[in-house]
Image (cartoon, helix red, strand yellow):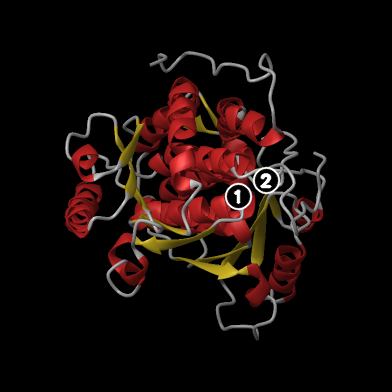
Amino acid sequence: MNSPSTKPQSATARQWPHHMLQEIYEQPESLARTVALYSSNGRLQPEFLERVRPLLTAPDMIVVASGSSRHAGLAGEIAVEDLAGLPVDVEYASEYALRPATARKQAAVLAISQSGETADTLAALRAARERGHRTAAITNVEGSSMAREAEVSLPTPAGREIAIPATKSFTAQLAVLHALALAAAQVRGVMTETEVEQRLARLEQLPAGIAAQLPEWERSVEAIAPFYSRAKTLLFLGRGIHYPMAREGSLKLKESSYLHAEGYPTGELRHGPNALVSPEVPLVVLATRDPADADSLRRYESTLQLLEGMKKQGATVLALANRDDRLVPGLSTHILFVDEQPEHLLPIAEVIPLQLLAYFVAVRNGVDVDRPRNLSKAVLVE
């Protein structure tokens, strides 16, 4: 594996068959740019801290978003609540603007959108402003309507994303939300500056680690994609902060390959969806863990119990696990390994093999992966 100081390898030298694959490979660079915008030398940028301070001292936060951006918001909800103790509620943007004004007048509202022009999310942001909320927007287009109209703009410098399925813009959103969670922890006095610096150091090392893993992920996923391209339905499962990545993995597969897929909390499998499990309905299980996090280990143990039950049931399982895991491979049909990371950073790494799964299944099934039917991006320019 590359050392933490290794510069992420450029994705420009290779000839790419599709924009989506290129943009998946551009993620180490886009993540490095994003992290550098919010931290420097292991510290949060002072200007960033001052801009978000009024938002992070609010009693709670509402996130409004749609599609992949909402899944980023769900992961951000868990990170902000776990690391900073700030209550967060994630709303569907399409629902928020149509609901009557609530009594939560002091809540800060965070809109998340790749383009900054998503109609539902823009309407939600404008409704929040009319209701007197403090507002912020995470977008990949600095001159977009949301970036201009929110009180605080939190850009993701991921660069132009041509393929319709979001890849590098999504992981950049996760990185900004992680920085926001650490900022909230520092502003609210939950973590010391030293504790924040230690976590930022891991965030700054992440792009190089992803660059080192990408070729292996590509080879492994391409090899197993034909097996999963024949599925009737796939069920993606994750616990805690990994559940939003299960949702994102299922969405990416749906929109890229036209296969049906659903994302569930792992423990919910036995409450109905297990009736679907068969050779034609495989499971994709996120079974990574953070050995330094007791809650992560408890979730991992519960996931192991489910995998043991699924093996007895004869289920087909594609699992994502830590590279040193000795238990999950024996309970899975196929395995993809992810290098160890802190619990709240694991989603940024583990979602990338799921993006590759969507890509290679789509290509295998003859889908124009850059332009799936019935979908469009609001804005294609920076």
- Residue 9 picture quarter: top right
Label 1 belongs to which residue? Answer: 257
Query: Residue 255, can we see it?
Result: yes
Which of the marked residues, 1 or 2, is nearer the chain's N terminus?
A: 1
Query: Residue 188, can we see it?
Result: no
For numbered disc 1, what is the local secondary structure? Answer: helix
Q: Are marks 1 and 2 in contact (CB under 8 Å)?
A: yes
Residue sitting at x 70%, y 64%: 121
User: Which three-letter amino acid code belongs to the residue tagged 1?
Assistant: Ser
How many marks are shown on the rendered structure? 2
* Picture layout, residue 218 above or below residue 364: above
In the image, taking residue 17 as reference, residue 332 lies left or right, namely: left
Q: Nearer the viewer, residue 34 or 14?
A: 14
* Residue neighbourhood size for the residue with mark 1, other residues' Cα within 10 Å, grouped as few (<14), some (14–19), many (≥20): many
Q: Which mark is residue 367?
A: 2
In the image, taking residue 359 as reference, residue 290 lies left or right, namely: left
* Picture layout, residue 28 above or below residue 147: above
Quadrant where the image shows the N terminus:
top left
Residue sitting at x 65%, y 64%: 134
For numbered disc 2, what is the local secondary structure? Answer: loop
Q: Position of residue 35 (x, y in %)?
A: 55, 32
